[in-house]
Image (cartoon, rainbow, N blue to C red):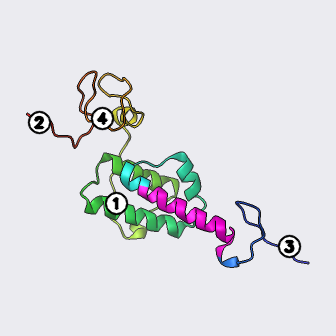
Amino acid sequence: MTELEKCEACGKVIKDAEHAPYCKECDDKLDKQFDTIEDNILIFKELLDSEIDTLKKFETGDIKDLFKRVHKKFKDDGKLDNESLIVLNKLKDIFKLSESKMGLPPIKVAKETKEDKLIKNNQCPGCEKKVQKDFNLCPYCGYKLNKDFKQKS
């Protein structure tokens, strides 16, 4: 008697091998999470550890396609800045991706600066006090938190 294949996520018996190693419900849930992760990368320019764990459940081809879409979107929007490069390099390093094998030019290596880390943690780089994520200027010291913010003269 052959052993039935079970979903890695919920343990249900897999009836449709098309979605293996997950059942259809878990596969659909993972696909939604994948789309949400892509949106978060594009909007917030960050990749959380929990999102990396989810992405590890996907095939390399899916990750390569994600990388190419994100790279193209950042480039088309003219926002291939330090934050974007940090996310792309993180994806590239974790999943051992090669730009040349994906038909892309090499991207610059960008390191997260102290300023980047503080802003990500909702702290002002000028005075290191807690600020709200949507602030353009620090209310304590006047530091410009949003690089795109234009002050009225």
In the rendered structure, the answer to whether residue 146 lies left or right of residue 50 reads left
Query: Quadrant of the image for the N terminus?
Result: bottom right
Circles 4, 1 touching at the beta carbon (< 8 Å): no
Q: Residues within 10 Å of mark 4 (few under 14, many from 20)?
A: some
Q: Between disc 1 and disc 3, whose residue precedes? A: 3
Mark 4 or 1: the one toward you: 4
CA–CA distance in space, label 1 to label 3 = 47 Å
Residue occupied by mark 1: 106
Q: Residues within 10 Å of mark 3 (few under 14, many from 20)?
A: few
Residue occupied by mark 2: 152
Q: Between disc 3 and disc 2, whose residue precedes? A: 3
CA–CA distance in space, label 3 to label 2 = 70 Å
Q: Is residue 101 visible?
A: yes
Mark 3 or 2: the one toward you: 2
Magenta range is 19-39
Q: Quadrant of residue 17?
A: bottom right
In the rendered structure, the answer to whether residue 94 lies left or right of residue 77 reads right
For image coordinates 29% across by 54% down, the residue present is 80
